Structure formats: structure tokens, C-alpha cells
Image (cartoon, helix red, strand yellow):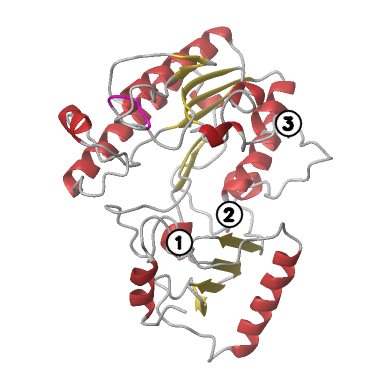
């Protein structure tokens, strides 16, 4: 974990919590950080008043260690103090989130709670699998897990989400609180990403399209749906607009304010979204319904609305669209920081699976 102190989110860079803090919001992060370690980086250095959770990318659900065989790798923190606490990680995160909401409700203070559950991230351990926690020697747990275990992990997370919503109601602040349930990437291993193909670490739709549910009673109509193409970066301008504050003009935002679409049903705004990912030298651009994808040295053009499984490669049928999107991507990429250009098989060996998916040879 030594590299955590070398690379991370620069404390001087404005963040959602730092900007809301200036607008008198309380700010707390509960759960996963994974944006750099002490002494150079951390939640308290990037705008959060309080932090309870872990700094590394994953954690055993029972030992709370990153490296199970190591006796000094426990990674549970209360602010900047390492703590030891028994219990199933998903439950501990839920307990702390409920407490934080109760405290803010009693203080009648507006707040941002960033709640980052580890579940259902590997290792594959349900709430009754403490013995499994003692058995495995690596968090990657290649030979572990099952659909039943995955179901138990998701079910327990859902239970804690329900407790969070109840805490907002008990504190009589549900109507004043925007709740967003989303994810940081597509599912992996035991996840069902239907009707998309691909999963975590892939720029196929199954790796890009994630759940996004928003609740704001009295402002967002229950059960409503928007066709607006959105991305995780949109939440920052959306929350700043809802709080009546603005971003730092020296750091322009990449996302868009989604409030018009969420609260008033405004028509979708056309936009382009770009991705690049070193694993398998992946590149992607979505423009409206069309998507350019380069992966493992092969290029594709898909209509991801008509063909969400990404089976019909349209680059020969629509060559003008293909060439335009390739050029648009190259122009965007030229304005970005330099990118590594070699093709990697990655830690999970997905290259052959992707080639099989498309029926092509790896180049």
C-alpha cells in the first residue's frame, strides 16, 4: 500500500465536499475512499469534515484487512485514526451512516453524506461467511464465491440502504434530502448485466451503464424516467445547483446539471461522452445513439439504443459515421494527457473472452 502516499487526489483541487463545506454544509464520507493515502492524501484533506471507512480499494468483510495474510494490513479508520471494530463490513458501514444522518438531523444542519459500500465487491463473502474469511489467502479470491453468496451480499447491502432511508424519515428530513443510488462501474463475475454485454474493466455497455436512481420527494416525481444520457461527473454540478452554490471558476466542471431533466422533465440534451482505459487499450465515444469502440486492437460502430448487446458492427454499413466518430475521438484524445498505448491482458485475463465475444483475433 506504499504507493497510496505517492498518488492521489490533490488536496488543493476543489471537490464536491469542499465546495459544499463553503456553503455551510456538513460533509462526511462513510466507506471506501481509494484516492490516495496518508500523509499526502485523504478525505479530511479534500473537504470532508469526517471520515469513517477504509482507504484502500477493497477490504475483507470480516478481518477488515487488505492483505489477509498480513497482520498489519487492517484498513479501518475513524477520521485519521486507525480503529479495530468487529462485525460484517456492510453492516458497520450502514450503522455509521445511520448515526451520521441522525446527528445531522438533530443539529438541523444541511449535509453531504458520501456513502460508499464495498458490497458487492470481492472478496465473495456473505454475512454468514466468517469462516471463509479466515480460509482465503488473497482478496482476489479466484476460486471463491457463488451466485448464492453474491445474492446474500447484495441483499445485505439493500437492507442497509433501507435503514438509511428510514433514518432520513425518522429525522424528518426525507423531503429535504436528495438520495442517489448508483455505482462506479459495471458488474463483475456473478453480476447479470443484461441486456448489455461486458462487465467491469470493459468499455462495452455492461461496463459503462450502471444503475442510477434518484429520490427527492416533492421535486422528482416517483416512478419517472428520463432518457437523458448522463455520467457520474454530472452529479457534482447537479448537487451544487440544488444547494444554490457554484463551482470554482478556475476548475471548470466536466459534467452537466441534471436538475431540469430530473425535476421538470426537460427534453434530453444531446451530448458526446468519451472514455479510454489502459486495459486492452480500450477507447470509446458515444454520440447520440451511436458508439465508436476500439478494444484489443479491433474497432466497431454500434447503435447502442437499437442494439444494446453490441452485436451488429455497423462500421462498413455506415462508413461516414464511423470515420466521423473516429476523428472526433482522436481530436478529443489529443487534448488529453498522454495515454499509454500498449495492449495489456490485465490482471483478470479478459482479452481472450473479449475476442471470443466479437469473433475476432487479438492483434
Q: Is residue 331 above or below residue 252?
A: below
> According to the image, label 3 marks what residue?
244
The alpha-carbon separation of the residues under discs 2 and 3 comes to 21 Å
Q: Is residue 63 magenta?
A: yes
Q: Is residue 34 above or below residue 86?
A: below
Q: Mark 1: few, some, or many residues within 10 Å (few <14, many ≥20)?
A: many
Instruction: Give the mark nearer the N terminus: 2 vs 3.
Output: 2
Question: At 68% across and 80% down in the image, what residue appears?
Answer: 324
Name the residue nearer the viewer: 142 or 215: 142
Instruction: Give the mark nearer the N terminus: 1 vs 3.
Output: 1
Name the residue nearer the viewer: 153 or 46: 46
Q: Position of residue 163 (x, y in %)?
A: 35, 24
The alpha-carbon separation of the residues under discs 1 and 2 comes to 18 Å
Q: Is residue 156 magenta?
A: no
The alpha-carbon separation of the residues under discs 1 and 3 comes to 36 Å
- Front of the two marks 2 and 3: 2
Q: Helix, strand, or loop for circle 2?
A: loop
Would residue 358 appear left or right of 114 to someone viewing this image? left
* Callouts 1 and 2 close, C-beta under 8 Å: no
> According to the image, label 1 marks what residue?
202
Residues rendered magenta in the picture: 62-66
> According to the image, label 2 marks what residue?
230
Q: Quadrant of residue 278?
A: bottom right
Q: Position of residue 143 (x, y in %)?
A: 20, 49
Q: Is residue 284 above or below residue 83?
A: below
Amino acid at each position: 500500500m506504499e504507493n497510496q502516499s505517492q498518488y492521489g487526489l490533490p488536496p488543493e483541487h476543489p471537490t464536491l465536499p469542499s465546495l459544499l463545506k463553503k456553503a455551510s454544509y456538513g460533509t462526511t464520507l462513510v466507506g471506501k475512499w481509494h484516492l490516495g493515502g496518508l500523509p499526502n492524501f485523504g478525505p479530511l484533506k479534500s473537504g470532508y469534515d469526517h471520515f469513517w471507512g477504509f482507504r484502500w480499494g477493497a477490504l475483507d468483510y470480516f478481518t477488515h484487512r487488505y492483505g489477509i495474510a498480513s497482520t498489519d494490513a487492517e484498513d479501518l479508520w475513524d477520521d485519521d485514526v486507525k480503529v479495530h471494530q468487529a462485525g460484517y463490513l456492510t453492516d458497520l458501514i450502514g450503522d455509521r451512516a445511520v448515526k451520521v444522518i441522525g446527528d445531522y438531523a438533530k443539529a438541523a444542519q444541511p449535509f453531504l453524506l458520501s456513502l460508499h459500500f464495498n458490497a458487492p465487491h470481492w472478496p465473495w463473502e456473505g454475512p454468514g461467511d466468517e469462516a471463509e474469511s479466515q480460509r482465503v489467502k488473497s482478496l482476489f479470491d479466484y476460486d471463491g464465491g457463488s451466485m448464492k453468496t453474491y445474492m446474500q451480499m447484495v441483499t445485505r447491502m439493500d437492507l442497509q440502504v433501507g435503514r438509511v432511508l428510514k433514518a432520513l424519515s425518522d429525522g424528518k428530513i426525507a423531503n429535504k434530502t436528495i438520495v442517489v443510488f448508483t455505482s462506479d462501474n459495471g458488474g463483475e463475475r456473478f453480476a447479470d448485466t443484461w441486456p448489455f454485454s461486458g462487465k467491469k474493466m470493459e468499455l462495452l455497455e455492461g461496463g459503462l451503464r450502471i444503475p442510477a436512481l434518484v429520490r427527492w420527494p416533492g421535486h422528482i416525481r416517483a416512478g419517472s424516467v428520463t432518457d437523458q444520457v448522463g455520467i457520474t461527473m454530472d452529479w457534482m454540478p447537479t448537487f451544487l445547483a440544488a444547494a444554490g452554490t457554484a463551482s470554482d471558476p478556475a476548475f471548470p466542471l466536466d459534467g452537466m446539471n441534471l436538475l431540469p431533466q430530473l425535476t421538470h422533465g426537460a427534453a434530453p440534451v444531446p451530448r458526446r461522452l468519451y472514455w479510454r482505459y489502459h486495459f486492452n487499450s480500450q477507447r470509446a465515444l458515444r454520440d447520440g445513439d451511436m458508439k465508436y469502440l476500439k478494444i484489443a486492437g479491433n474497432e466497431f460502430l454500434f447503435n447502442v439504443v437499437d442494439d444494446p448487446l453490441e452485436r451488429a458492427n455497423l462500421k462498413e454499413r455506415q462508413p461516414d459515421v464511423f470515420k466521423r466518430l473516429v476523428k472526433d475521438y482522436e481530436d478529443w484524445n489529443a487534448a488529453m494527457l498522454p495515454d499509454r498505448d500498449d495492449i495489456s491482458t490485465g490482471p483478470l485475463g479478459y482479452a481472450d473472452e473479449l475476442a471470443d465475444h466479437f469473433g475476432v483475433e487479438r492483434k
